[in-house]
Amino acid sequence: MSRTYVIRKEDRMNREGKYEILKRYFGYDTFREAQEVLIDSILEGKDTFGIMPTGAGKSLCYQIPALLMGGITLVISPLISLMKDQVGSLNQAGIHAAYLNSSLTPGQYHKALEFARQGRYPIIYVAPERLLTESFLDFALHSQIDMVAVDEAHCVSQWGQDFRPSYLKIMDFIGQLRERPVISAFTATATKEVREDIVDILQLRDPTVVTTGFDRSNLYFGVVKAKDRYGAIKDYLETHKGDSGIIYCLTRKQVDEVCERLLKDGFAVTRYHAGLSDEERKRDQEDFIYDRVPVIVATNAFGMGIDKSNVRFVLHYGMPKNIEAYYQEAGRAGRDGEAAECILYYSGQDVITDQFFIERGQAEQELDELTRAIIRERDRERLKRMTFYCFTSDCLRDYILRYFGEYGSNYCGNCSNCLTQFEEVDVTETARALIRCVESSRQRYGTTVIVDTLRGAKTAKIKSYRMDEDPCYGACAKTPVYKIRRVLDHLQLKGYLQVTDDGYAIVKLTESSREVLEEGSQVIMKAAKETERPEKGEGEKKKESKGKKGPVGGVELTEKEETLFQKLRALRTQIAREESVPPYIVFSDKTLVHMCMLKPRTRQEMLSVSGVGDHKYEKYGERFLGCIAGDLAEAPDRAIDQRDRPE
Ligand code: ADP
Ligand code: MG
Ligand code: ZN
């Protein structure tokens, strides 16, 4: 049986071979940080553990050694959709690979296994449930398995968010092999507990461990406290037409509402949540993945296993219950490394929804009451840290990195706080009024009552609690409510006040509260300069501040290049249809952008575009060259502003 990948015997274990494979099959010139270390470690026969954020390029770290080792690499992956995607990408690149999971009919399964026995596939993706089945074991025992690569390795840990008991079978399986293969493990989620679990449970032997930072510098982070959230999101979509994006909502009901309104307002969107039929979910998800519909409105049920690389924005219509969840969801933007935006549209109401989820969350698990109480406590703490993310006026990226135990630079220049001009405002008066009010009302009331008292509101609640007789009543009558609220948020952030998180949100004093009342003390808060921040959606704001952007956030394409980009994108969609694969598997957005910038005219030039390898060139290169040539012919003046190029 001939293999399409041609690797000379001498190249086996030859470290140089990896560059050739990188270029020829994947179309890239250089390895990213950490990839090379991980690959070399595997090629030296060492167990290897890579912890890298989403989009960092973990797949190549086991795929490339797999092609150089000579035998077979088994890749364990938790989800059918992930396997399909990866195998699809490999096949597109001209590499023989297959998957073995329950999506195959028994006939297909045995056929694939038969080919596997014949050594046709250097890389085989397999579901963990299959490992110990008779037919699979029989195959494995009679084949040379050089490596077992465990993708999404956090699934072995009960600490992780996606524990899968079937992952525990991996070690049983390996134990049965005649020779112990190299074991490699990869994950993007890595708190300390999870890391330790992975090393222990997979019994990694003196592994090479490489952790790259959690930072995803291509992602812009923003928090928007919009009064009209829907309007803000609509504005955003208005200014990002055609871009692929995800809008996360907290509840199914919210998904339905937002989706319906957007459809009514003429946007092409689809939706996803656990309440839809399997059929509907599958269709909606595919519409999104195949770029038939650019935007999907979804609950957090959507995403695991979605490797779509050209997601340009992730908007959160509501605040998730912790930073881990937020970063995972937001991190689905910009996997291709191109600029992408992650914006959280926050409302105070979200905390209550999240609290509800937390109180209810653990009920169905078989845990004793004490454990449940501990978990709830931990979850409340996490929610608090998430809430502070929405209040802080420091660098948002820094805030996230610090949460994961890294140190940032305090200024990233690519988040809404770094890009907002702040001024320092003395809010001592309001702060004191808030604290006095909490004190005089004996720490019994929630935030709304406190704020309403200060502004002198005449609501039924205020009257019935007789807060209109409180000495602080009307103390801040001249300050807009939202400002009083921000000061309250700030006091919480700084620990001068606390709000209970047991579902009632009662404002309480803290040990530091009195400091604020002391003579000579001052409370200074950073606040956005008012003139710079119109009460419009984020979309509007960006349009004003950044000017026109290219089709892919951040990269500045000229208008003509953008037209070309649209043409290339259309061609990609057409090819994807012919081949029945998602468009991003044909070429990523990044590759198309490079084409627009380089405007290649020859095979050689086309091969210098990032993401164009030999195999893909043979398949589609000429069609893309044709498209570019056609575009140049239509706009001949392009020749004038052409870059210098070696002939
Ligand atoms: P992860 O599994 O770490 O989330 P993937 O393996 O899915 O990431 O890779 C994310 C994207 O990065 C893919 O589109 C992949 O082709 C691209 N990529 C990986 N390595 C490189 C590289 N060395 N140069 C350019 N792009 C790369
Ligand atoms: Mg991956
Ligand atoms: Zn920043």
Image: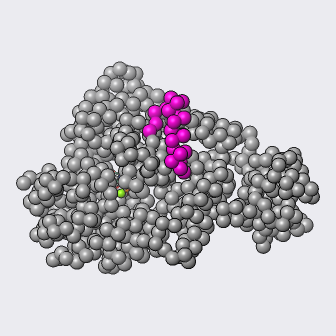
Task: Name the residue at 49% across, 50% down.
Answer: 299
Residue 496: x and y in percent read 77, 66
Residue 254: quarter of image: top right
Q: Is residue 588 magenta?
A: no
Q: Image check: 121 left or right of 511?
A: left
Front residue of 469 and 345: 469
Left or right of 162 on screen, residue 81: left
Report the coloring of the rendering: one colour
Among all residues in the image, which is located at the extreme left? 1
- Residue visible at 21% across and 39% down? 619
Instruction: Assign the C terminus to one quadrant of the image.
Output: top left
Above or below — where is 206 with respect to 432? below
Q: Can I make out residue 425 in this image?
A: no
Q: Residue 265, how many percent across, how many down?
A: 54, 30
Camera-side residue: 606 or 244? Answer: 244
Please tell me which residue is depicted at 39% across the width and 30% down the height of the picture: 566
Viewport quadrant of the N terminus:
bottom left
Residue 457 appears in the picture as rendered: yes
Residue 250 lies in magenta, yes or no? Answer: yes
Q: Is residue 475 left or right of residue 360?
A: right
Q: Say if 73 sits above or below 259 in the image.
A: below
In the rendered image, which quarter is residue 80 located in? Answer: bottom left
Q: Residue at x 20, y 62 (%)?
A: 68
- Residues drawn in magenta: 248-270
Left or right of 324 on screen, residue 64? left
Q: Position of residue 369 (x, y in %)?
A: 55, 75
Image coordinates of residue 241 in percent, x first then y, are: 49, 33
